[in-house]
Amino acid sequence: MTVQASVVEPGVIGDDSGFSLHAPDGTSYRVELTSDVLAPGNPLLAEYCEGRRVVAFVGPTVERLHGRRLRAYLAARLPSGSWSVVVLEGGEDSKTMESAEKICAQAKLAGLDRHGVMLAVGGGVTCDLVGFAAAMYSRGVRYIKVNTTLVGQVDVGVGVKTGVNALGTKNMLGAYHPAHASLNDPGFLTTLPLRHIRCGLGEIAKMAIIKDPALFRVLEDCPKVFQTSYATPSWLAEAGLGQRGVEDYVLRSSMALMMEELCPNLREHDLARLVDFGHTFGPVIETASRYRIAHGESVAIDMALSSQLARVLGLIDDADCERVMRLLVALGLPVHDAATCTPELMHRALKAAWERRGRRLYLVVPDGIGSAVFVNDLDDVPAAALEEALRQLESHAQQLADPLIAAH
């Protein structure tokens, strides 16, 4: 008797408890949505760790807020002596190869074997670092992400990229290493500072601008989502959406959009990627500011500049460009930074992106709300056009009274 192996069609499948991704290259992984993930009565994390030695890594903020609960959970659900917790340095400055090597050293000291698990509990920096260390350690061990920030839950936590900053460049060294499990608990978002919420909203706005006019409209109607309660907008309810509330709709929509966009090109064989919107000028802005500007803020400034550039190039009309600018400001995000938004630095950012993307620019710019196109070559962005976009950006930022300009 011949047993036929089941074939899973490539794509992203959503259900009440999360999303499963099956890429054309055969890679599969799941992102879970759960509540009270560190409550001893919730078996989800323990089930993914079952039968394996676990070394958990947390940053100082997560240690302060959740360290006791994490240890209590591991003590209640895993065998004694099978787990340990290590506190890492925090901040983007710690996202280095040296830090990744220290993680590997701690894992070795704890006796982590090829069947073991590195557990990252934290935001994007912690998960990127631990994921990269896991990819290197013994040529690759399993790791689990418990994403505690909004950026982590909608961006880092749904993809397969890991990495560290090196050679003066953000995420210069890294690996594609799918997590054994990625767990999102919206309850963590209630402990986040306002700035971290806004950074996450920048990544959500990115997906809305390039892919989803309905999500864009929800953000316009509910710009303080994850900070205050909103009733589901009537137009959304009439469309049969948002039954679980605005926060759930925004979180699930952005996760699904990101995973669907990543799925057919998971390891970036095609360097023309819509999800790179906000990530052409942004990395240089972030690095040149010495991380004074947070990642989500640099994405917002990039999206604003890219939108102004699209307007100058005749790719988006004034009304839609204005809607993008107003949304970013309503979300509490900066749209300009005088110290880094200079013609010299932004020309350098374009050149760096062109080199990184195989001598093609693939600059993502919106051509409407929920739609985007590529500007493919450096020659398609004349110096005069970029400088005019920068002038318009500064002028718009002043007119819109950007609440964060003074802070940056």
Image: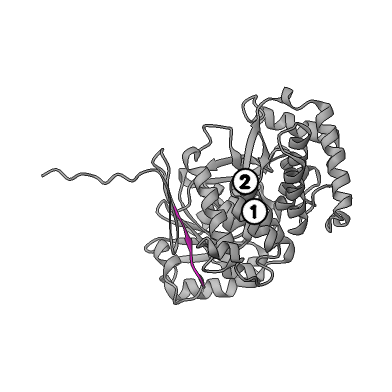
Image-based side of 69 in relation to 80, left or right: right
Kindly identify the residue that appears in the image at 51 percent across and 65 percent down: 84
One can see residue 338 in this view: no
Please name the residue that numbered disc 2 is placed on: 370
Secondary structure under badge 1? helix
The CA span between labels 2 and 1 is 7 Å
The x and y percentages for residue 251 are 57, 60
Above or below, 407 against 193 in this view is above
Do labels 2 and 1 touch, CB within 8 Å?
A: yes
The x and y percentages for residue 69 are 55, 74
Q: Nearer the viewer, residue 284 or 325?
A: 325
The prevailing secondary structure element of the residues shown in magenta is strand
Kindly identify the residue that appears in the image at 73 percent across and 48 percent down: 324
Q: Nearer the viewer, residue 61 or 344?
A: 344
Q: Nearer the viewer, residue 310 or 200?
A: 310
Q: Which stretch is magenta? A: 30-35
Q: Could you say which disc has been placed on residue 216 in the image?
A: 1
Q: Is residue 208 magenta?
A: no
Q: Amino acid at mark 2?
A: Gly
Q: Amino acid at mark 1?
A: Phe
Q: Nearer the viewer, residue 221 or 286?
A: 221
Crowding around mark 2 (Cα neighbors within 10 Å: few <14, some 14 to 19, many 20+) is some
Image-based side of 357 in relation to 160, left or right: right
Above or below, 265 against 235 in this view is above
- Outermost residue, top side: 379
